[in-house]
Image: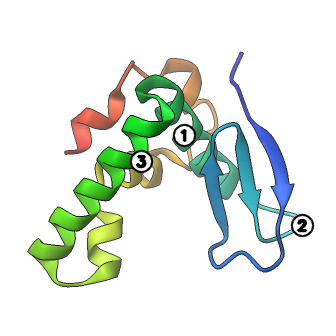
């Protein structure tokens, strides 16, 4: 069974979606499946690494990418956690077969 978190709608959220284990925060009332899959992948990443390690790693990798690219959008899209989520968000059953710590393939 795939853990899908507790979905909370926050209309004033500055992004479309965000995973903060055990919650999936969404801006819209009716999210599409791709957005949900993306956030569910992040929940799995957070479960595997632990919440604190996930965000420490995420922030560190973001800062390194920001220094490298000098651009927020490129830095964000190249974080390994995001690369995995974007690459697999359209695959409905990805989490059922996803290997442990699969984000490492995207570093």
> Looking at this rendering, what residue extends furthest in the top direction?
1
Q: Nearer the viewer, residue 74 or 14?
A: 14
Looking at this rendering, what residue extends furthest in the bottom direction? 71
Tell me if 30 is positioned left or right of 79 in this view.
Answer: right
How crowded is the residue under tag 2: few (<14 C-alpha within 10 Å), some, or many (20+)?
few
Gap between marks 2 and 1 measured at Cα? 20 Å
**Apparent side of residue 103 relative to residue 94 in the rendered image (left or right):** left
> Which residue does the numbered mark 2 point to in the structure image?
29
36 with respect to 75 (left or right): right
Q: Quadrant of residue 52?
A: top left
Q: Residue at x 53, y 27 (%)?
A: 47
- For the residues carrying marks 3 and 1, which lies nearer the camera in this image? 3
Q: Which residue is mark 3?
A: 55
Q: Residue 16: x percent and y percent?
A: 67, 71
Q: CA distance from mark 3 to mark 2?
A: 26 Å
Locate the N terminus by quadrant.
Answer: top right
**Where residue 88 sits in the image (x, y, percent)?**
47, 44
């Amino acid at each position: 069974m795939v853990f899908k978190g507790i979905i909370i709608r926050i209309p004033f959220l500055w992004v479309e979606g965000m995973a903060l284990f055990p919650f999936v925060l969404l801006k819209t009332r009716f999210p599409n499946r791709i957005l949900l899959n993306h956030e569910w992948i992040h929940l799995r990443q957070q479960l595997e690494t632990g919440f604190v390690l996930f965000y420490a790693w995420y922030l560190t990798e973001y800062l390194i990418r920001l220094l490298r690219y000098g651009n927020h959008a490129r830095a964000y899209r190249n974080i390994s956690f995001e690369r995995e989520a974007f690459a697999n968000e359209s695959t409905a059953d990805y989490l059922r077969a996803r290997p442990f710590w699969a984000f490492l393939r995207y570093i």
